[in-house]
């Protein structure tokens, strides 16, 4: 079974026969013990350290359909190497473009993305509201839940995408205001800050959101959808904006729940972070634990109501892509994924 591989240390990645060979290199240029990654076991690569590679390697990765996602020193997502779009189909491309160009058709999909994100946010808040009924600070949760429900009710009447983005922004701002109540005294939200995040909690959110984005991008790649044509976010010249749309639905379930769980179990402490000029960074050991837990979350399975079988969260993202494909082809109306547990 193919798996995501995370390369945390600087080093050299090369092809050796039909295997990937990673040789770590320290700051003095000394090479460590090489690791071999059987290519048939690799679905994609996440690169957090500096990587030395050549075109022969990327040719090999491209033929094997392995995407490579890069993160800089500050844990910001910087870009991806995507193999040739092996599943892109002309009919799908045309229909996807038609739905973007038509304001009416675009709004239907964009509203569905916001609806799915808001419903999953409410699911998270209601779970912690039930668990935290005896906590003094949690008294804000019912009020925030009511506010988000009101904002959600206004989604179907939003006249255009900018208005819809405004509603989505207000929902998320209200949501983030609840984080202090959920997490207690260990970490403080103090508003959402990014590029760079200004405190520990914002550093966790930024890293988690980027991991969710790249997970969505990897799943979109394995469908006929074009990742550059989006509906909620404006398509940019150099970004895969459909992954941003898709990530909105899954961030509350995959990222925020992971943060709450790791903090409440004391798997992450303030000492796991360091302040540098301009921002806050997660230390290497903590980052490894966070990546391991995120990867485990993607592999976790649930009993799917419609399919009647267990599916992983990673496969849920792919199923969401398939649902969007059916909508674009006029087979089934798109209904966003909403957590029911």
Image (cartoon, helix red, strand yellow):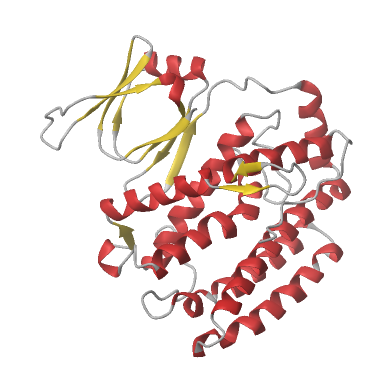
Q: At x 78% / y 56%, what residue is drawn?
A: 111
Mark yes or no: residue 191 visible: yes
> Up-down: is 2 above or below 213?
above
Mark yes or no: residue 276 visible: no
- Name the spot of residue 274 as percent of width and height, x first: 26, 62
Left or right: 282, with 190 as reference point? left
- Name the spot of residue 337 as percent of width and height, x first: 72, 52
Q: At x 81% / y 70%, what residue is drawn?
A: 154
Q: At x 58% / y 60%, what residue is drawn?
A: 252
Left or right: 155, with 194 as reference point? right
> Up-down: is 169 above or below 283?
below
Residue 22 image-quadrant placement: top left
- Name the spot of residue 218 as percent of width and height, x first: 56, 35
> Up-down: is 284 above or below 19?
below
Viewer-proximal residue, 231 or 7?
7
> Up-down: is 21 above or below 259?
above
Q: Residue furthest top?
A: 17
- Name the spot of residue 185 as percent of width and height, x first: 38, 80
Q: Residue furthest bottom?
A: 136
- From the image, which quarter does the C terminus lie in? bottom right
């Amino acid at each position: 079974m193919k798996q995501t591989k995370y390369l945390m240390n600087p080093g050299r990645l090369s092809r050796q026969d039909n295997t990937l060979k990673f040789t770590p290199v320290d700051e003095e240029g000394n090479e460590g013990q090489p690791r071999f990654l059987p290519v048939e076991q690799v679905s994609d690569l996440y690169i957090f350290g500096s990587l030395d590679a050549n075109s022969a390697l990327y040719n090999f990765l491209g033929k094997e359909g392995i995407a490579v996602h890069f993160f800089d020193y500050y844990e910001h997502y910087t870009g991806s190497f995507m193999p040739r779009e092996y599943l892109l189909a002309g009919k799908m491309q045309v229909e996807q473009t038609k739905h973007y160009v038509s304001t009416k058709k675009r709004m239907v999909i964009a509203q569905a993305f916001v609806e799915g994100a808001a419903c999953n946010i409410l699911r998270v808040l209601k779970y912690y509201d039930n668990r935290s009924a005896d906590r003094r600070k949690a008294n804000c949760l019912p009020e925030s839940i009511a506010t988000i429900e009101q904002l959600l009710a206004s989604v179907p009447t939003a006249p255009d995408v900018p208005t819809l983005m405004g509603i989505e922004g207000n929902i998320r701002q209200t949501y983030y205001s609840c984080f202090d109540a959920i997490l207690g005294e260990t970490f403080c939200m103090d508003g959402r800050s990014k590029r760079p995040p200004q405190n520990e909690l914002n550093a966790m959110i930024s890293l988690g959101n980027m991991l969710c984005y790249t997970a969505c991008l990897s799943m979109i790649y394995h469908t006929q959808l074009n990742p550059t044509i989006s509906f909620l976010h404006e398509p940019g010249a150099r970004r895969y904006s459909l992954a941003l749309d898709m990530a909105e639905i899954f961030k509350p379930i995959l990222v925020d729940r992971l943060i709450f769980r790791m903090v409440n179990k004391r798997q992450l402490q303030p000492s796991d972070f360091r302040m540098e000029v301009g921002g806050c960074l997660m230390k290497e050991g903590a980052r490894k634990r966070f990546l391991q837990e995120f990867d485990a979350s993607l592999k976790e399975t649930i009993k799917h109501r419609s399919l009647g079988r267990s599916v992983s969260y990673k496969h849920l993202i792919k199923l969401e892509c398939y649902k969007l494909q059916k909508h674009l082809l006029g087979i089934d109306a798109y209904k966003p994924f909403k957590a029911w547990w």
